[in-house]
Amino acid sequence: MNFWEMFVAFVLGLVEGLTEFAPVSSTGHMIIVDDILFQSKEMFSPQVANTFKVVIQLGSILAAVIVFWDRLLSLVGLKKIPSESGDPRQKLRLSQVIVGLLPAGILGVLFEDYIDEYLFSIETVLIGLVAGAILMICADLFGPKKPPVTSVDQITHGKAFLIGLFQCVSLWPGFSRSGSTISGGVLLGLNHRSASDFTFIMAVPIMAGASFLSLLKNWQYFTVEVIPFFAVGFISAFLFAWLAIRFFLKLINRVKLIPFALYRIAVAIILYVLVF
């Protein structure tokens, strides 16, 4: 394993970590950085390159698990934490998370093959980047100025389900899971921080489940030659995702979504120029 391959692994892990949970579309960034600039599928086989992307996504998931460790333990009944709403009767429970996951989970299972075959292209990602940006701008412009929901502990099963419906549009590549669900939460009366918290908490089981299934299918590509490449990418993704999540959660109530939406449009323009 040479220095260049390690450098590529580090940069791809950095890109994955910084963009996986921010509402900017990690798919769009990986197309620009890997598929266009680094082309890891030329360095290794396409199967190894795709497995690597699953591995670095697991690094990002681990970062989210650590940031929300106490909350996740509380959801499965292993730790008691005080309600953020100040009302002990209001508490985010596992049932709300499951309800939020159901719509996208069901559609993802039903249409997985169709999405993989027909929707993963530069054109569809460009559409997703711009459409997601428009949704985010609408959320900031038309969401309540004084959101009644300021904590994840105030999220009802009904709101969780409706946020889950917004998550369905993230099945379109480039739309962004966090972009769609945070926008949906804001439109439904959550402040930006509580919508972000709920988005990241929901992301852990759905991303972990999908990643582990992919790893099981591609376990044969974990050879001695590529383990260092995978390890560097995993560690890089974990570290930068941890930093990105902590920074984003402190920032989001102040800057809101429009700056990220404008950035997405800029990424779409760059992607269009590079490809077309």
Image (spheres, rainbow, N blue to C red):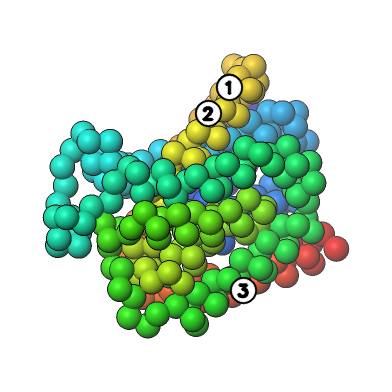
Q: Count residues near mark 3 (Cα–Cα under 10 Å), then give few for <14, some for 14-19, many for 20+.
A: some
Residue with the most extreme front position: 158
| Depth order, front residue of 274/51 | 51
Residue with the most extreme right position: 276
User: Disc 2 and disc 3: Cα gap in Å?
Assistant: 32 Å
Is any atom of residue 5 visible in this view? no
Q: Mark 2 points at which residue?
A: 212
The disc at residue 134 is 3
**Measuring 50% from the left and 40% from the top, which residue is drawn there?**
207
User: Disc 3 and disc 1: Cα gap in Å?
Assistant: 37 Å
Residue 77 higher or lower than 118, as above or below = above
Q: Mark 1 points at which residue?
A: 216
Please state the horizontal and vertical placement of residue 60, each as a whole percent of the image: 46, 43
The quarter holding residue 38 reads: top right
Residue 149 higher or lower than 107, as above or below = below
Label 3 secondary element: helix
Please state the horizontal and vertical placement of residue 236, each as a whole percent of the image: 48, 42
Residue 257 higher or lower than 238, as above or below = below
Q: Count residues near mark 1 (Cα–Cα under 10 Å), then give few for <14, some for 14-19, many for 20+.
A: few
Label 1 secondary element: helix
User: Disc 2 and disc 1: Cα gap in Å?
Assistant: 6 Å
Q: Do the residues labelled 2 and 1 touch (CB within 8 Å)?
A: yes
**Measuring 40% from the left and 58% from the top, which residue is drawn there?**
158
